[in-house]
């Protein structure tokens, strides 16, 4: 295969982008990162290798980090990544470049695409209107055509867009280091992160979509097992048909999930998400 596109997607944005990109690249294949981790298979065989995933806390998601740390990528001559995001700055390109450097490789092209925000714990979260979704999709498809040209000609490219937190450079400097650190090293240790409220009907969808295997049904109630790592994909939260999954407020952040709606990508079903895993 000329091009392998590895993807990770909690609510379908990155899946949409990865699928559309695959249609634009001849002799290309889509490969779920979660399946590869489950199979303990880190061999990359394409001449071009791409990674498509969401921005989590300004950086790469935990399973993408775990995968990239271990890849064996000798045949690859050209690497690209696409981070989908709500719209903030993305600091994960440097992290990926660092992992590739350890193998004597280099991240050739790095892109970010703004999509619907899938984080209802935030006070400013709002479900996009139909018009907003249409605009997001139109812009994403336009950007993918530019990305296609860059990849096919194996150009070097670094996306520098994204909104900073404030005009204060020192504050941005601190937050751009603190938030990725919290996302990778503090949030996964928080014991009481999710819970199911009384609206839960016991349907089991949260277990089906859980990409790390953390959610398991115990009778008719979901349990977030404390000994299993959370990928922070928010599939359990966004695909619960009763909107019963909630995030606890933390000392450092109030959670608005009880007052907000949910965001799965309009073309991605719970089954599409669960197909990223074997089990
Ligand atoms: C835990 C978490 C953290 C996030 N952090 C950011 C962020 O720092 N910046 C941003 O622009 N979007 C952030 N988002 C939004 C997602 O990056 C965005 O909605 C993405 O397109 C979701 O892709 P997916 O549907 O493939 O999972 C975050 C989402 C989650 C669940
Ligand atoms: S998806 Fe929602 S309703 Fe179904 S079991 Fe999980 S929490 Fe309960
Ligand atoms: S517990 Fe929820 S957020 Fe964590 S990996 Fe499972 S589905 Fe994703």
Image: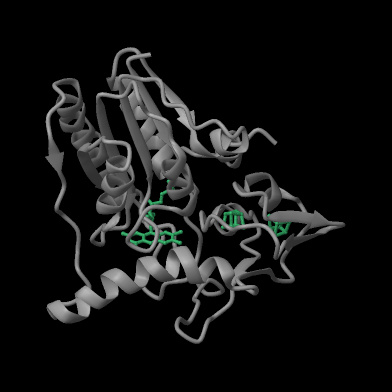
Give the answer, above or below, for where 250 lies relative to 54: below
Q: Position of residue 45 (x, y in %)?
A: 40, 20
Q: Quadrant of the C terminus?
A: top right
Q: Quadrant of ligand 3?
A: bottom right
Q: Is residue 8 left or right of residue 141?
A: right
Q: Position of residue 111 (x, y in %)?
A: 22, 43
Give the answer, above or below, for where 152 lies relative to 218: above
Q: Which image quarter: residue 202?
A: bottom right
Q: Position of residue 146 (x, y in %)?
A: 15, 31
Q: Residue at x 27, y 32 (%)?
A: 79
> Colour scheme in the image?
one colour
Q: Nearer the viewer, residue 77 or 134?
A: 77
Q: Residue at x 12, y 29 (%)?
A: 155
Q: Quadrant of the N terminus?
A: top left
Q: Which image quarter: residue 231?
A: bottom right
Q: Which image quarter: residue 118?
A: bottom left
Q: Residue at x 48, y 67 (%)?
A: 185
- In this view, the residue farthest toward the bottom is 251
Inspect this view and state whether residue 210 appears.
Answer: yes
How many marks on residues?
0
Q: Residue at x 43, y 53 (%)?
A: 61
Give the answer, above or below, for where 53 lies relative to 251: above
Give the answer, above or below, for where 276 lies relative to 161: above
Q: Is residue 192 left or right of residue 165?
A: right
Inspect this view and state whether residue 131 appears.
Answer: no
């Amino acid at each position: 295969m000329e091009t392998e596109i590895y993807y990770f997607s909690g609510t379908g944005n990155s899946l949409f982008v990865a699928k559309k990109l695959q249609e634009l690249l001849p002799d290309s294949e889509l490969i779920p990162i979660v399946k590869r981790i489950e199979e303990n298979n880190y061999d990359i065989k394409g001449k071009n290798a791409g990674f498509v995933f969401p921005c989590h806390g300004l950086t790469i998601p935990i399973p993408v980090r775990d995968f990239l740390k271990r890849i064996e990528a000798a045949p690859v001559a050209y690497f690209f990544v696409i981070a989908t995001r709500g719209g903030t700055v993305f600091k994960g390109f440097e992290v990926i470049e660092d992992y590739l450097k350890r193998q004597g490789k280099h991240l050739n092209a790095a892109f970010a695409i703004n999509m619907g925000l899938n984080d209802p714990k935030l006070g400013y979260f709002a479900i996009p209107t139909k018009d907003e979704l249409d605009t997001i999709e139109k812009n994403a498809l336009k950007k993918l055509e530019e990305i296609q040209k860059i990849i096919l000609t194996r150009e070097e490219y670094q996306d520098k867009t994204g909104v900073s937190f404030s005009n204060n450079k020192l504050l941005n400097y601190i937050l751009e280091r603190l938030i990725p650190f919290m996302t990778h090293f503090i949030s996964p240790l928080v014991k009481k992160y999710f819970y199911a409220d009384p609206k839960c009907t016991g349907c089991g969808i949260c277990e089906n979509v859980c990409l790390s295997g953390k959610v398991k049904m115990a009778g008719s109630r979901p349990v977030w097992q404390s000994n299993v790592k959370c990928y922070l994909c928010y599939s359990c939260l966004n695909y619960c048909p009763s909107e019963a999954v909630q995030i606890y407020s933390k000392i450092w952040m109030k959670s608005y999930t009880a007052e907000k709606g949910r965001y799965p990508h309009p073309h991605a079903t719970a089954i599409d998400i669960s197909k990223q895993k074997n089990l």
